[in-house]
Amino acid sequence: MAKELIRLEDCRKEFDGEVVLDSISLAIKDKEFLTLLGPSGCGKTTTLRIIGGFLRPDSGKVVFDGVTINDVPPHKRKINTVFQKYALFTHLNVYENIAFGLRVQRPKLSEQEIERRVHESLELVALKGYEKRSVSQLSGGQQQRVAIARAVVNKPQVLLLDEPLGALDLKLRKDMQRELKQIQQQVGITFIYVTHDQEEALTMSDTVVVMNKGEIQQIGTPLDIYNEPKNAFVADFIGESNIIDGVMVSDHIVRMYGRDFECLDKGFSPNEPVDVVVRPEDIDIVPVSQGQIVGTVTDVTFKGMQYDIIVDFQGFKWLIQTTDHSPVGTRIGVKIDPDGFHIMKKSEYSGLYGDYSSYSAEYDELSADPEGGGQEDE
Amino acid sequence: MSKNKLFSGTVGAVGGFFDRFRRQSFAYPYVLWMALFVVIPIILIGVYAFTSAQGTFTLENFSGMTDYAPVFGRSLWLAFLATVICILIGYPVALAISRADSKTQRILLMLIMLPMWINFLLRTYAWMSLLENTGLINRLLASIGVFDLINSLHAGDAGYSPITHFQLINTNGAVILGMVYNYLPFMILPIESVIVKIDPFVIEAAQDLGANSGTVFRKVILPLSLSGVISGITMVFVPAVSTFVISKLLSNGTVMLLGDLIEMQFSGAAYNPHLGSAISLIMMVIVVICMSVMSKFGEGEEQAVVM
């Protein structure tokens, strides 16, 4: 891909003695769609605000196009932001909201130039004909479009988006995801996107940065992050995962429940304790006699496309996603192909995630839109 | 939420009616109050203004009104100046308060309201004793030799008579000072309450789009706080234009305002409630015109909530 545009070097930020960002280092390439993903309080918004210039790192450097910009105020950065709650100017109409960034430019732009570029922006977000509307008359989705048009009209090199779709309903959010991706490709600039929604991150991004507790957990393509999570936190946060204690007996052999399973991973020291990740969709339900392991179904939820089945394997509860219905109480066997295992080194997160004992509570939390994603760090 | 739903679901239209009825009835005490002490007095003023002492209809009360033009002019002018000064002092104060952290904000607002805990008359009397010819300010200036210095500088001038004090009280300035002092909190509070409600992200958005702090103020904070300024103007101008205590105490009758003129018609030697009502009526009309012109500026803005 293209050259590096932004680099964070060991950026650290504390609020009232609490470490919000712990020495973050990150390189962002030109024209890439990068997503900072993590739960609230993970430091993603703080990172974004440091890039935008609204916060100054306590230590470390922010480098933009080869120049350190720690002390450059927001209005002098070639970076624009789409704020979480849009932050539109309620005293101005749609046209003037978008023209704001052009009107404050010095030397002054001609009125024709302003008009041309405002219309160009409106066209980009499919809001032609809304020029004279008051922003308070617009729906949430339309306000979001105005916020995007307002931010791109200045032709920034980077657009920062802070949970821009958080306030929209699910259907609209899906449409806007696609549209945002299109807009990014059309204007050809770097997007840095903050979200707590893993699905959003996987759908839109070129690069996903998973964060937790002020630290970067993993940087990679959506595929990498999903298929090769680095630790139990990432495995649990991205999608659903059963994470089981295991031992890497030797290359390609992992032991759990006192049984050896064939897997594709290698490069661990002999008998190294590991975390074993099995995605719920990689598990086949088979008759008890053919099962690699055998357990009891304790819960079944119909999800439309599949059933979510909770199976108790010797006290550890797994989530299995299947199209076949198995009623609660049945004994089932399961079979996992070698490529269904992903082996991770032990980390501070080992044992914290990946057990579905508290299934229903956890599931509700995951599917419901967690509140206050943007209030973090403040 | 679910409780509410249950209610309307079972009780239905009847419940809705009673609901509405009950809610409306909460306003009755106030409606009664307004009717007794606002609407009826205004009608009485109207009746008095258009009748003579004999109780017959007349326009005579208005015919001599041009004699009082200077009083009208002075009242409006002084109230206007006081309002302008209140904006000039009050806006920066409100802005500064709104930028403080919430604890400091509370303390500062408290300090601004503190003088209001002291009786209005008492506060104005206090200014009297400060501004008098032998008052605290003049005595202080004398004690540090200001007048001696001035007199010595002019010692050789022909026809110069030495001064012993500055004329502070009984001037337009003293009346304006009294107005500003008494009504300033009513300018600061509505402006402050509007500014603190401005979303900080809107200000960040403006910075983000390239506006420096001056431009942010001019193009975002000022227009968004205009509704507060308009509330403030209303709350300062209206009482200032009709005050009589301030002018009476701080000018000893030398600066006659509309309020003094009206008061004289009701309780003074010139007892004439018909003329007093006529003057009141005209003042009311002027105030209403001023306010509607003002509110034109704030059109489309949400009404400022006071405190």
Image (cartoon, rainbow, N blue to C red):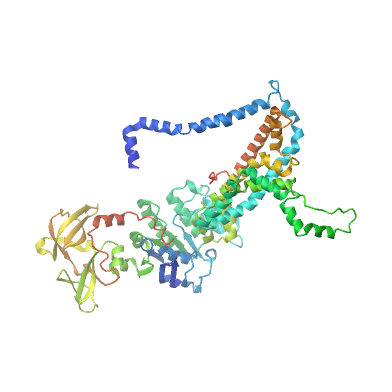
Picture layout, residue A182 above or below residue B167: below
Q: Where is residue A165 in the image (x, y as percent from the top left)?
A: 40, 55
Q: Residue at x 74, y 47 (%)?
A: B169
Q: Which one is nearer the viewer's eye here, B247 or A175?
A: B247
Q: What residue occupies the far left of the structure in this picture?
A: A289
Q: Which residue is drawn at 13% across and 59% down?
A: A332
Q: Position of residue B155 (x, y in %)?
A: 87, 58
Q: In this view, does A65 lie to the left or right of A205?
A: right
Q: Where is residue B265 in the image (x, y as percent from the top left)?
A: 71, 31
Q: What residue occupies the far right of the structure in this picture?
A: B158
Q: Which one is nearer the viewer's eye here, B24 or A71?
A: B24
Q: Is residue B78 left or right of residue B24?
A: right
Picture layout, residue A16 above or below residue B220: below
Q: Where, quadrant-wise, is the N terminus of chain B in this rendering?
A: top left
Q: Residue at x 70, y 20 (%)?
A: B54
- Visible residue check, residue B83: no
Q: Which one is nearer the viewer's eye here, A326 or A113?
A: A326
Q: Which one is nearer the viewer's eye here, B300 or A274?
A: A274
Q: Where is residue B239 in the image (x, y as percent from the top left)?
A: 64, 41
